């Protein structure tokens, strides 16, 4: 299906099913409610075929350009039907999983993810290694019948609700750095895994500490080959900094429009509004170009660090403007409004951290793209 036809037919379908798709809660909602809402929207859009376009046939998709699924996520985010960050998880984990996992594994596991029957989480960061991912220490030791995983992950989004975890573990020595890392696909119900939710600054337990105590993982659940975990992570991170951010751009565009509508007379500084509108537009243009390069089969790599820096700048600019314009709603807990502005303002502070911190992205841009020297 071509993009224009898809866009038109999807918009009609979304209009026709607006009541069924609408969230059952006002305002921001809790993380649990947001995840339930996402599952409902995934079921409906998958069963009607929309959420299968842009994914390959081997995982139950209907094929076609990745732009089709980018438009679906844009349409859902800009109608406030899903929380764009949480909704983006299949875009972050799915493409690299399909590339690296054995075809039987991806054929069995990806369809329930796309249909919203399962939640997956991304077990990369550890207490000692977030930016310095290559030094991770969560260990997978070889046993006769499979791996045994022992260690800890942290900031693992939605781990408390997840059915599976895409986990990076050390299978070589620490000295072997990124060469000794292997990616594993772990069932979260396996004995030996314990999950402790952590509240973010906006008051929701969006992420968790995850502890692994001698957790058995079959060899058949290795994603790619032993020692390929770093290549897997390097393939995956550009998705986290590209398609996932296109949805975020749609969300920010919508919030800026809503801010204009919600502003009391005279409260919105027109110069500041113009500057933020320009930033949002520039980011959408950048992100759109990234989507087109991705759809054309380009290997994006480090250039997506530019998208990530731009997203963080724009997200914080939109909500800084919201704070100036609607100070009571943003600054006062229990203040007027449905807490949406307040929670989203607080969450926007995380934009310079999640998906790779702003400092690290700037280092990548300086060193890998502008060739301004290495780390030493
Ligand atoms: C909302 C949210 C959701 C997340 N979800 C997940 C998830 O699902 N799965 C997951 O694995 N992780 C997740 N993360 C973790 C995220 O990827 C890390 O927080 C991030 O990569 C930074 O790592 P860190 O927290 O260990 O900070 P550190 O790496 O300890 O960095 C601390 C500070 O030092 C700076 N810094 C570090 N090294 C350098 C350097 N060489 N040069 C300049 N500055 C440097 C950083 O920029 C940062 O400001 C999430 C984080 C957030 C905020």
Image: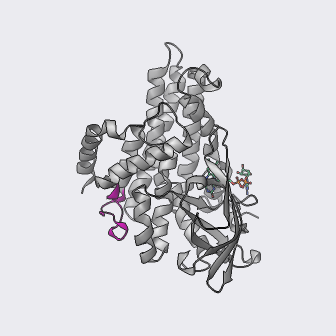
Q: Where residue 14 sits: x, y (%)?
A: 30, 41
Residue at image point 60% right, 46% down: 206
Residue at image point 37% right, 60% down: 295
Q: Against 93, is 16 above or below?
A: above
| Viewer-closest of 282 and 357 | 357
Q: Residue furthest bottom?
A: 144
Q: Residue furthest front?
A: 191
- Is residue 53 in the magenta section? yes
Q: Against 370, is 168 above or below?
A: below
- Is residue 82 in the magenta section? no
Task: Determine which quarter of the picture holds residue 46.
Answer: bottom left
Q: Against 131, is 22 above or below?
A: above
Residue at image point 23% right, 50% down: 5
Examine the residues drawn in magenta and state their main secondary structure. loop
Q: Which residues are magenta?
A: 51-66
Q: Is residue 179 visible?
A: no
Q: Where residue 122 sits: x, y (%)?
A: 58, 60
Residue at image point 55% right, 39% down: 30
Decide if residue 327 is on the left or right side of residue 103.
right
| Viewer-closest of 279 and 267 | 267
| Viewer-closest of 263 and 375 | 263
Q: Where residue 314 sits: x, y (%)?
A: 55, 39
């Amino acid at each position: 299906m071509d993009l224009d036809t898809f866009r038109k037919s999807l918009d009609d379908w979304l209009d026709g099913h607006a009541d069924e798709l609408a969230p059952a809660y006002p305002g921001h909602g809790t993380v649990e409610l947001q995840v339930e809402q996402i599952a409902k929207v995934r079921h409906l859009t998958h069963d009607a075929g929309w959420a299968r376009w842009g994914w390959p046939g081997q995982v139950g998709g209907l094929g076609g350009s990745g732009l089709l699924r980018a438009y679906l996520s844009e349409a859902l985010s800009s109608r406030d039907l899903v929380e764009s960050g949480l909704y983006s998880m299949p875009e972050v984990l799915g493409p690299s999983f399909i590339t690296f996992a054995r075809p039987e594994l991806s054929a069995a596991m990806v369809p329930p993810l796309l249909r919203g029957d399962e939640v997956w989480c991304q077990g990369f960061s550890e207490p000692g290694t977030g930016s310095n991912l290559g030094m991770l220490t969560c260990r997978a030791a070889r046993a006769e019948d499979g791996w045994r995983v022992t260690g800890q992950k942290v900031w693992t989004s939605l781990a408390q609700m997840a059915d599976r975890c895409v986990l990076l573990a050390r299978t070589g020595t620490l000295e072997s750095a990124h060469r000794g890392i292997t990616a594993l696909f772990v069932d979260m119900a396996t004995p030996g895994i314990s999950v402790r939710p952590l509240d973010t600054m906006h008051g929701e337990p969006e992420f968790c500490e995850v502890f692994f105590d001698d957790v058995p993982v079959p060899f058949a659940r290795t994603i790619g080959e032993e020692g390929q975990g770093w290549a897997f992570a390097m393939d995956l991170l550009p998705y986290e900094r590209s398609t996932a951010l296109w949805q975020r751009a749609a969300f920010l565009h919508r919030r800026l429009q809503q801010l204009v509508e919600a502003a009391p007379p005279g409260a919105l500084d027109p110069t500041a509004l113009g500057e933020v509108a320009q930033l949002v537009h520039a980011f959408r243009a950048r992100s759109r170009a990234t989507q087109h390069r991705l759809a054309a089969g380009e290997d994006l790599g480090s250039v997506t660090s530019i998208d990530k820096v731009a997203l963080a700048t724009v997200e914080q600019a939109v909500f800084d403007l919201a704070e100036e314009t609607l100070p009571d709603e943003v600054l006062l807990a229990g203040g007027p409004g449905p807490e949406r502005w307040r929670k989203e303002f607080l969450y926007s502070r995380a934009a310079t951290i999640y998906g790779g911190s702003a400092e690290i992205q700037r280092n990548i841009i300086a060193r890998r793209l502008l060739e301004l020297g290495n780390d030493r």
